[in-house]
Image: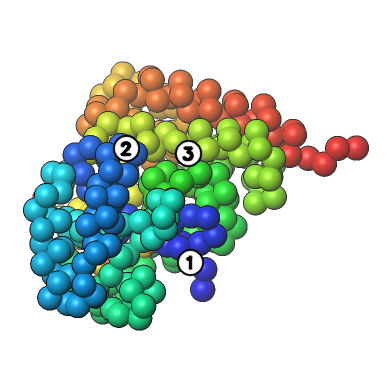
């Protein structure tokens, strides 16, 4: 099975609570992951010691955006260079000792959980997202939003006149332009539907379809970029400005299309 969580050059920690912070900017999350990693480095690999360390780390962590959603203090960096986010309690990180019971779930839950993206994203879509995102911070926001990935790629395809394929990302300028389009996810208001709305449950537990109330915004005709704008929550209820985001979507799609020709072999 394809792995979205840990793959070549890219990793995700979203379901361990990575983005559940009032300040989910790259520097803030990076600092928190580094703090946990350094603190756990010297801790004895026993359940008692890890539990105590986890409790101390949780107490000193930043405020969560959603207090009811768990944030695991055992998520940190797996590498010295601090590029790969992952579980510091996993047996692969501890010489075979499994300490995941010391986190906010238990071993069985951590082991079994796969977010819905595993069922919905094709390997090609996942590979494109991984190639375009240049670090864990953007990758985790993008890979967990299937509809956003598809809307962005469809928008580029309409502009470029061809379906985006993995091989197109070998062209640096196109890869950079697609990254900028995906990076809309990093520029949204805190708490925005576009950050966390991919599977926001309604009263019955089923996902609530995202929708922009164009009538209330005086735009009865909607927007030609509705699919992407809906994904990023271009709506006052999300705290985002429709006009500003629409202009950004248009600019970034144009930028992708402008360099797409360079992905074709010369001659
Ligand atoms: S949110 Fe999904 S892709 Fe990310 S670590 Fe969890 S299961 Fe893996
Ligand atoms: S213990 Fe579970 S929830 Fe905590 S970081 Fe590891 S996998 Fe994530």
The residue where tag 2 is placed is 27
Sequence-first disc among 3 and 1: 1
The residue shown at (27%, 39%) is: 28
The residue where tag 3 is placed is 182
**Quarter of the view holding residue 234:** top left
Sequence-first disc among 3 and 2: 2
> Secondary structure beneath disc 3?
helix
The residue shown at (86%, 37%) is: 266
How is the protein colored in the picture? rainbow
At which x and y percent is residue 183? 44, 36
The residue where tag 1 is placed is 3
Q: Nearer the viewer, mark 3 or mark 2?
A: 2
> In the rendered view, would you say 137 is above or below 155?
below
The residue shown at (31%, 18%) is: 218
Q: Quadrant of the C terminus?
A: top right
Mark 3 vs mark 1, CA separation in Å: 20 Å
């Amino acid at each position: 099975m394809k792995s979205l969580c840990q793959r070549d050059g890219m990793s995700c920690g979203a379901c361990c609570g990575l983005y559940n912070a009032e300040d989910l900017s790259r520097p803030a999350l990076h600092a928190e992951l580094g703090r946990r990693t350094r603190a756990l480095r010297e801790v004895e690999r026993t359940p008692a010691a890890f539990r105590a360390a986890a409790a101390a780390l949780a107490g000193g962590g930043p405020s969560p955006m959603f207090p009811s959603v768990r944030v695991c203090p055992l998520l940190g960096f797996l590498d010295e260079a601090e590029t790969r986010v992952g579980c510091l309690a996993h047996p692969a990180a501890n010489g075979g000792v499994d300490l995941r019971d010391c986190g906010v779930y238990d071993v069985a839950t951590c082991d079994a959980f796969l977010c819905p993206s595993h069922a919905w994203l094709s390997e090609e879509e996942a590979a494109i997202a991984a190639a375009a995102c240049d670090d864990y911070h953007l990758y985790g926001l993008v890979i967990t939003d299937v509809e956003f990935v598809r809307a962005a790629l469809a928008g580029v395809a309409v502009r470029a006149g061809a379906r985006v394929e993995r091989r197109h990302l070998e062209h640096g300028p196109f890869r950079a332009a697609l990254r900028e389009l995906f990076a809309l996810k990093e520029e949204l208001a805190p708490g925005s539907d576009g950050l966390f709305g991919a599977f926001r449950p309604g009263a019955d537990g089923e996902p609530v379809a995202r929708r922009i109330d164009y009538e209330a915004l005086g735009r009865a005709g909607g927007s030609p970029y509705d699919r992407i704008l809906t994904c990023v929550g271009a709506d006052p209820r999300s705290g985002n400005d429709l006009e500003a985001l629409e202009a950004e979507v248009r600019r970034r799609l144009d930028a992708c299309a402008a360099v797409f020709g360079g992905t074709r072999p010369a001659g």
